[in-house]
Image (tube, rainbow, N blue to C red):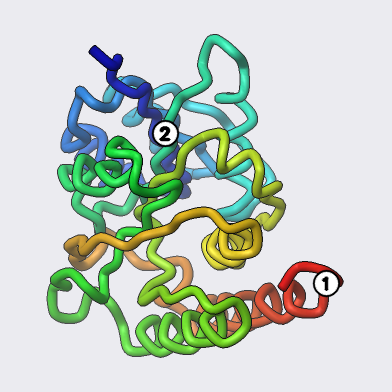
Amino acid sequence: MTPAPRVAVVIPALNEAASIGRVLADLPRPPVARVVVVDNGSTDNTAEVARKGGAMVLGESRRGYGQACLTGIAWLCAPERRPDILVFIDGDYSDHPGELTRVIEPIVAGRADMVIGSRVLGSSEPGALLPQARFGNWLATRLIRLFWGVSYTDLGPFRAIAFPSLLRLGMADTNYGWTVEMQVKAAQIGLIAVEVPVSYRKRIGRSKVTGTIRGTVGAGTKILWTIFREVVKPGVR
């Protein structure tokens, strides 16, 4: 019998004490063997709640969603910790952690290298996916299709990727461009990427991105900049 893949989860977290415990409690174990919460400079007791929930907690004072993800990846690169599949999920309880098995299934079955949990294809609670987020997803995914011929519907944070494939991408973005960088680079090197529908609900607490004008503008600008940066790189199309 083929052994079950080793599945790890990375959760970037900034002031998510009210929600992180619920995320950890809902993650299915198995298949999840290891959970890493990267505390990105929280001023509440996010780290304490995460430890009580059974997670390995890493501190990362350099702010940025992508930076927190990179810190988690670096820690998992040690041979004794290295997973077969890495899952990313937010710490605000907007995603449904119990759907993780659905998200990793195409990789486990050998049908994909990367899976994006699509909130557009799934069911979203009214008011959960705000109009500015929907428009940003629509624009970014159409630009990806235009430049690289790969169709996505979402840049959703709930995603899974085979760990060796992730390392091939050479991820570098430290903030808002993280998700789109991953999808663009996957298209560039020919990874097999699929989407599965996932559920989405209103997050616990206020969003650091779409909950503010500054965050919305900053995220939108960085996403577009990331796409066009990759377009002008020689030899990437």
Identify the residue position indicated by label 1 in the image.
Answer: 233
Locate the N terminus by quadrant.
top left
Viewer-proximal residue among 122 and 220: 122
Structural crowding at the residue carrying mark 2, measured as other residues with C-alpha within 10 Å and reported as few (<14), some (14–19) or many (≥20): many
Query: Mark 1 belongs to which amino acid?
Result: Lys
In the rendering, at what x and y percent does residue 183 appear? 53, 63
The answer to whether the residues at label 1 and label 2 have Cβ atoms under 8 Å apart is: no
Identify the residue position indicated by label 2 in the image.
Answer: 85
Residue occupying the far right of the picture:
234
Residue 17 appears in the picture as rendered? yes
Locate the C terminus by quadrant.
bottom right
The part of the image, by quadrant, that contains residue 84 is: top left
Residue 51 appears in the picture as rendered? no
- Is 59 drawn above or below residue 63 in the view shown? above
- Is 52 drawn above or below residue 202 in the view shown? above
The residue depicted at 38 percent of the width and 73 percent of the height is 154
In the rendering, at what x and y percent does residue 116 appear? 37, 59
- Is 40 drawn above or below residue 24 in the view shown? below
